[in-house]
Image: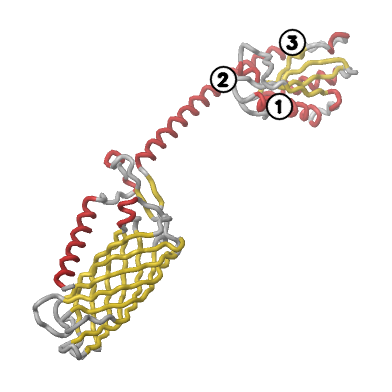
Amino acid sequence: MKLKHLTLISIGVLLSLFTSNVYAQTPEIEEEIVVVDFLPAGRTYYYSPAPRDNWFMSVGAGVQALFAEHKGKTPFSLSMTVDFGKWFNPQWGLRLSATGGALRLRYPQETDMLHYKNVSLAADFLWNMTNTIGGYDQYRIVSVIPFVGFASNYAFRNPLGKTLSFAISTGMRFNVRLCRYADLFLEGKINILSDGYNGVVKAKRAEATMALLGGLSFNFGGKKFGRYNPVSELFAREALNAEVNALRAEDNAYAQENEKLQVENANLKKELAQKPKVITEKPSQCDTQLTSAVRFTLNSSVITDEEMINIYNIAQWMKANPNCDVMVTGYADKETGTAEYNQKLSKQRADKVIKILVNNYKIEASRLKLVANGSTMQPYPNNNSWNRVVVFKSCETK
């Protein structure tokens, strides 16, 4: 292949990459100043979760050749390469590479062989064409990666003299995934040089080095990207805000209900304080519904300080009536929770009351009978919130 053809191909690759860069991807927007109205709906953005992620280093070897003034077939020689770079997102990356080795050229006669040493330092922009066209897939086996950049080539141990040339670097790389931390790569690259890199200036055409390389690429921290979709996150935030507002409204309703209960409780305490404490021995006294009740908040078995007075009253009544036992019955409101859950909750409420009577007021446990009615029975059918309660009923001691 003549070098002018190689030059035309390289220019075509550069134009295609430039066009893809203009039309395939808009500039990245900093997360702190995202304006959702200006982002395309449904678009997913990718980023490195940490600064140390998505760095890579490659080591490989292959063959290279110099296309310049020569006679006969172009000979290939051993070449070594090492590079270090980073993927900024699944489509775009940057690397610095060093490639070097021997070069041979038949000149000025086919029987004459010139031997060179060559070192090329390049900075290349990497385009993962597979991720751009097919979408990002961290488990994809094969990735096709065109690249283009700038290089400086230095030839030494040249019988015709040392030369330095700045070049356009372009080529194609194939990554084959071995695991999260390592890839196998195959790469073909061309450096387009100015005439005279081989020490012979004919001013007729450009010169080029072409290398075919293969080796291993190591991914530091593993190749991985985080992702976010501003539009989806906006809808998610709106849904969360709506849920928070609903919970706040429910909390306000419970707060108002609690205030009403506190007022009712204060009135009950006032009525109890005004009633004279008359204890009479009546045979039927042990078969009555006691007026004291212990109220609870929604989905709770915690006894508040305000309700402790009712437990105190029951304890005093039992001490004054040693021949009477008490049935402690727990309830739960039927409008919240399942029947199974409410059964368990009503038992917990009654059990908490019994423990206070036994531990704090030294009431014999044998005089207390626990009953859990859950939400199957509602002692206060006209006010659902009142059914979060423990009530008492006295009975004769057996």
Q: Residues within 10 Å of mark 1 (few under 14, many from 20)?
A: many
Dot 2 or dot 1, earlier in sequence: 2
**Where on the picture, by quarter, is residue 292?**
top right
Disc 1 residue type (three-letter): Arg
Q: Which mark is residue 67?
A: none
Q: Is residue 92 above or below residue 319?
A: below
For the residues marked 2 and 1, what is the alpha-carbon distance in whole angstroms?
Answer: 20 Å
Q: What x and y, as percent, mark residue 87?
A: 35, 60
Q: Which mark is residue 275?
A: 3
Q: Which kind of residue does numbered mark 2 sit on?
A: Glu
Q: Dot 2 corresponds to which residue?
A: 257
C-alpha gap between disc 2 and disc 3: 27 Å
Instruction: Tally the numbered discs.
Output: 3
Residue placed at 34% from the left, 48% from the top?
45
Q: Disc 1 to disc 3, how far (Cα)? A: 28 Å
Q: Are marks 2 and 3 in contact (CB under 8 Å)?
A: no
- Relative placement, left or right, of 172 versus 141 is left
Q: As displayed, is residue 217 above or below residue 248?
A: below
- Along the line of sight, which residue is nearer the eye, 354 or 337? 337
Q: Quadrant of the N terminus?
A: bottom left
Q: Nearer the viewer, mark 1 or mark 3?
A: 1
Rendered position, 237 above or below 318: below
Q: What colour scheme was applied to this rendering of the protein?
A: secondary structure
Judging by the rendered image, the residue that carries numbered circle 1 is 349
Q: Is residue 304 visible?
A: no
Q: In the rendered view, does 119 fall on the left or right side of 302?
A: left
Q: Quadrant of the C terminus?
A: top right
